[in-house]
Image (tube, helix red, strand yellow):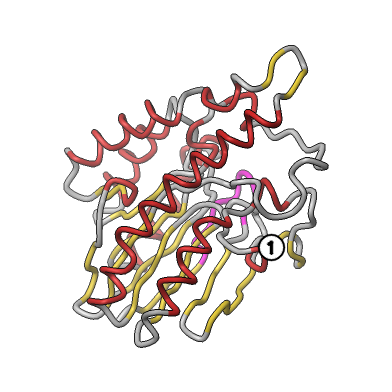
Amino acid sequence: MRLAWLTDIHLNFVGTAARRALMEKVERVCDAVVISGDIAESHDVEGYLTEMEEIVQKPIYFVLGNHDFYRGSVAETRERVGWLAERSDRLVYLTREGVVEVTPNTALVGHDGWADGRLGNFERSEIVLNDFLLVDELARHYHLGLLDKRGLRRALEDLAETAAGHFARVLPEAASRYGEVIAVIHAPPFREAAWHEGQTSDDDWLPHMSCKVVGDVMLDVMRSHPNCSLLVLCGHTHGRGEVSVLENLRVLTGGAEYGRPEIQKVLDVG
C-alpha cells in the first residue's frame, strides 16, 4: 500500500492546470491519499475535494486545517464536509471516523485539531492570525481592533480539547489492534515538531503553531502500547521537519509554499 501524503496545499491559490497536474501525479504514484489539512477555505473546500475525487480515483483520507474554516464557522464547515464525505465513495473525513484500517497491520486515525495556546507564551505574544478575523468562532473575540485574549484562549482550548477527546477515544483502540498507526492532524502536537525554516517555532509563535493537549494524549497512549508504532502527519507551520518523540512515536511536519502544492512523501505501508 502506497499512501501519498499532502498538506497545506491551499488549492484556492492554484490555477486549474496546476491543480490537475498535481492530482494526476498523485493518482499515478499511490494507492490512497492522506491530507493533513489546509485544502482551501470554507466556501470552496467542498468543490476542491470533489475535483480531487474525480481525478484521483483512490481513497482520500483527510482532515481540515485552520484555513479550511476561513470565511465560515468550524461547526458549519465540518457539517457540510462531513455530509459530502458520507455520500462519497472515496472521500473519508477522519474527524468523523473512528479507526480506519488501511492494511491488516496499519490503521489511520485523525482529527482537524487546533493550536491551543498552551506552548510558548500566549499572553506575551502579539501575533494576530487571520484565524482570529476569518473564523466565526474566533472572530467574536476580536472587535474594533481589540482582542479579548482570555476569551480567545478559551475558544482555542475548546477546539483543541475536542480533538484530544477524539484521539483519546480512537488511539488506544488502534494501538491495541494494529502494529502501526498513522495519526493525521493539522497543527503539530509537540513543540519539537513545530518547524519553521529549519528551526522550531519560538515562544511568540508556538501558541499558534502547536496543539499540546493532543500531544499529551499521544504520549500517554504510546507509552502504554510499546508494541505499536505511531507516525504523526501534520502541517500548519509550512516548515518541513521530523522528530522522534518516543521510540515508538515519530512526527513528520510538512513544508509548504502558497501556489506550489506538492506531494510531501509517498509512504510504503505494510
Task: Describe residue 229's horizontal placement relative to residue 208 as left or right.
Answer: left
Residue 221 in the image, given as x and y percentages of width and height: 40, 72
- Element under label 1? strand
- Report the quarter where the C terminus lies: bottom left
- Report the quarter where the N terminus lies: bottom left
Name the foreground residue: 98 vs 155. 155
**Quarter-wise, where is residue 154 in the image?**
top right
**Quarter-wise, where is residue 129 in the image?**
top right
User: Would residue 18 be visible to someone looking at this image?
Assistant: no
Magenta-span inclusion, residue 82: no
Task: Describe residue 161's horizontal placement relative to residue 126 as left or right.
Answer: left
Residue 236 in the image, given as x and y percentages of width and height: 59, 51
Q: In the image, is residue 94 above or below residue 156?
A: below
Residue 140 in the image, given as x and y percentages of width and height: 59, 19
For mark 1, does the 10 Å Cα neighbourhood hold few (<14), some (14 to 19), or many (20 or more) residues?
many
Q: What secondary structure is the stretch in magenta mostly built from?
A: loop
- Give the residue type at disc 1: Trp
In magenta, the rendered stretch is 256-264
Task: Describe residue 177's horizontal placement relative to residue 126 as left or right.
Answer: left
Q: Which residue is mark 1?
A: 195
Task: Describe residue 146's horizontal placement relative to residue 131 as left or right.
Answer: right
Residue 205 in the image, given as x and y percentages of width and height: 75, 49
User: Would residue 65 be visible to someone looking at this image?
Assistant: yes
Q: In the image, is residue 163 above or below residue 182?
A: above
Total labels: the figure holds 1
At horizontal 61% and vertical 44% (from top left) the residue drawn is 259
